């Protein structure tokens, strides 16, 4: 009788534990994608060398960084946003990836990929930037409800969102050739959109 009771408990355990594990491992955010750790988020959006032809991660030890919102708001933790974290965290940003890329010639791009947890929060962040930015550059293949850009000295700044992710691209080193900067932005956004699940 004890053996039969043990077998029943073992069978129930064998059936129930995997089911419980699958529930805890497939926790979903409201955008339908699985919850990612900061490292997983960073690796999802990190550009490999020549993923876009001619673009590679810039040299240096601080060229790729992933921060949680708490790390971003910590004044003792230096990061590329330096003091501007509340503009993002107050809108629901939970983590951010920074990557610096060197392109052909003097071209450079800083990529910021941010997780806002929900499509609504990412869209709200984009709408906030859209209201405060005088967009003057068209990004081919993207509607202004998804991506906007404006000219800066020697390049363009781009804001975009796909699902629960929000992106900022700072493209420099293009001189007065805003068309080339816009084409590069299109390539970057196409890759980021494909990586967004």
Image (cartoon, grey):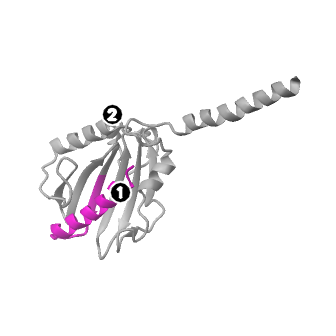
| 160 on left or right of 64 | left
At horizontal 28% and vertical 64% (from top left) the residue drawn is 187
| Residue ID for mark 1 | 194
Quadrant in which the N terminus appears:
top right
Q: Which residues are magenta?
A: 168-197
Nearest the viewer among 61 and 132 is: 132
Nearest the viewer among 197 and 168 is: 197
Nearest the viewer among 59 and 9 is: 9
Nearer the camera: disc 2 or disc 1: 1
- Gap in Å between the C-alphas at discs 2 and 1? 27 Å
Badge 2, how many Cα within 10 Å: few under 14, some, many 20+?
Answer: few
At horizontal 41% and vertical 55% (from top left) the residue drawn is 45
| Residue ID for mark 2 | 90
At horizontal 26% and vertical 50% (from top left) the residue drawn is 160
Q: Point out residue 157 in the picture as x, y percentages from the top left corner.
A: 23, 56
At horizontal 33% and vertical 71% (from top left) the residue drawn is 103
As drawn, 90 above or below 40: above
């Amino acid at each position: 009788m004890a053996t039969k009771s043990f077998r029943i408990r073992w069978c129930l355990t064998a059936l129930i534990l995997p089911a419980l594990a699958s529930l805890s491992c497939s926790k979903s955010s409201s955008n339908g994608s699985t919850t990612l750790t900061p490292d997983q988020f960073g690796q999802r959006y990190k550009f490999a060398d020549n993923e876009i032809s001619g673009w590679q991660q810039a040299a240096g030890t601080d060229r790729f960084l992933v921060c949680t919102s708490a790390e971003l708001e910590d004044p003792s933790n230096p990061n590329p946003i330096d003091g501007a974290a509340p503009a993002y965290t107050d809108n629901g940003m939970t983590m951010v990836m920074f990557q610096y890329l060197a392109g052909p010639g003097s071209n450079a791009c800083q990529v910021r990929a941010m997780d806002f947890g929900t499509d609504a929060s990412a869209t709200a962040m984009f709408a906030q930037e859209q209201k405060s930015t005088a967009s003057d550059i068209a990004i081919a293949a993207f509607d202004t409800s998804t991506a906007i850009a404006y000219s800066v000295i020697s390049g363009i700044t781009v804001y975009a969102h796909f699902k629960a992710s929000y992106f900022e691209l700072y493209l420099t080193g293009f001189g007065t050739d805003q068309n080339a900067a816009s084409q590069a932005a299109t390539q970057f956004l196409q890759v980021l959109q494909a990586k967004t699940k």
